[in-house]
């Protein structure tokens, strides 16, 4: 008995998802170990220099405050890198044509690419947490926020990576997207500081950055306190994810820069 169209469609999604996961896992020393090492170096430098000089929340040391920010920053950056690098490599090497001749819908592409990006982001984030946990005992005041913001954040950056991968036509453009958009937005989102320590103008600017709400909500799960309400953060992050995912799906459906 031949499988129905629905079963065939899901088989295609699973195959593409498996291929994308395998793609980063086969070079895990570069895609997982290297980001973990980078985060540990940030912790060693900033934690050592500022531990005795900065107190963010009551009874929360600076190193403890820094660790969730580094974990979430790693999740976001690596989720973006997974989908964007995969797509741009496929476009430049020409093997994207093998996907174009399949009957996979734009939903299947989205699910596989973003799903694999979420997996990579969470794997790297877990690696950063496991390694840095030795520097400060973790607390889990409201752990459901940790899961919600980690998954939503990874999904949003995986979707944004799809958009960047579709837009870019060479590695230089992709590097510019990452260096001038993703990197500043993650570094200026409260990873290394509380926005309440900033002057009023820069506090207002920080509140326009959706990455701030991802990291602030994620940190809420560890300490039970945050700079803004976690429900406000959830609304903004979920809304941002829907907008970015909708744009990515639209570009995939229209064949933007992949069908000529």
Image (spheres, grey):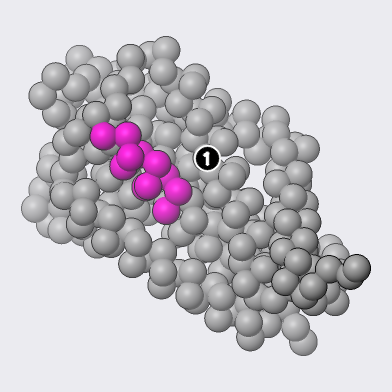
Residue at position x 16%, y 44% in the image:
227
Q: Is residue 189 visible?
A: no
Residue at position x 65%, y 38% in the image:
31
Q: Which quadrant of the figure has residue 252?
A: bottom right
Task: Please state the horizontal and vertical placement of residue 233, each as a whole percent of the image.
Answer: 25, 54
Horizontal side of 165 relative to 157 (left or right) equals right
Horizontal side of 74 relative to 163 (left or right) equals left
Q: In this picture, which residue range is highlighted in magenta?
A: 142-152
The residue that label 1 is drawn on is 122
Residue 144 inside the magenta-drawn segment: yes
Which element type, helix, strand or loop, lies under badge 1? helix
Horizontal side of 146 relative to 25 (left or right) equals left
Q: Which quadrant of the figure has residue 1?
A: bottom right
Q: Relative to the observer, which residue lies in front, 211 or 234? A: 234
Task: Please state the horizontal and vertical placement of residue 155, each as a whole percent of the image.
Answer: 49, 56
Residue at position x 63%, y 51% in the image:
116
Quarter containing the C terminus: bottom right
Horizontal side of 34 relative to 156 (left or right) equals right
Residue at position x 83%, y 68% in the image:
3
Q: Relative to the observer, which residue lies in front, 84 or 234? A: 234
Task: Please state the horizontal and vertical placement of residue 251, each as a whole percent of the image.
Answer: 59, 79
Residue 24 lies, with reference to residue 46, above or below; the image says below
Residue 250 lies, with reference to residue 185, above or below; the image says below
Q: Relative to the observer, which residue lies in front, 79 or 104? A: 104
Residue 76 inside the magenta-drawn segment: no
Residue reaching furthest to the front? 1
How many marks do you count on the picture?
Answer: 1
Magenta stretch: helix, strand or loop mostly? helix
């Amino acid at each position: 008995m031949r499988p129905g169209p629905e079963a065939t469609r899901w088989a295609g999604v699973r195959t593409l998802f498996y291929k994308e996961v395998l793609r980063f896992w086969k070079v895990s020393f570069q895609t997982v170990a290297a980001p973990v090492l980078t985060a540990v170096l940030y912790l060693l430098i900033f934690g050592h220099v500022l531990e005795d000089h900065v107190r963010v929340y009551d009874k929360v040391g600076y190193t403890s405050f820094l660790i969730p920010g580094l974990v979430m920053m790693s999740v976001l950056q690596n989720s973006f890198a997974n989908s964007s690098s995969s797509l741009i490599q496929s476009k430049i090497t020409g093997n994207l044509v093998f996907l174009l001749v399949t009957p996979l819908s734009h939903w299947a592409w989205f699910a596989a690419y973003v799903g694999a990006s979420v997996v990579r982001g969470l794997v790297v984030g877990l690696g950063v947490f496991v390694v840095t946990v030795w520097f400060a005992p973790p607390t889990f005041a409201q752990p459901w926020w940790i899961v919600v913001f980690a998954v939503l954040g990874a999904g949003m950056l995986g979707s944004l990576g799809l958009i960047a991968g579709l837009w870019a036509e060479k590695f230089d453009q992709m590097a510019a997207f990452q260096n001038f958009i993703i990197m500043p937005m993650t570094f200026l989102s409260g990873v290394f500081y509380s926005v309440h320590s900033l002057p009023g103008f820069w506090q207002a600017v920080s509140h326009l950055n959706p990455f701030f709400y991802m990291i602030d909500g994620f940190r809420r799960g560890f300490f039970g306190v945050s700079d803004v309400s976690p429900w406000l953060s959830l609304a903004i992050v979920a809304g941002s994810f829907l907008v970015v995912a909708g744009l990515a799906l639209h570009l995939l459906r229209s064949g933007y820069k992949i069908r000529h």
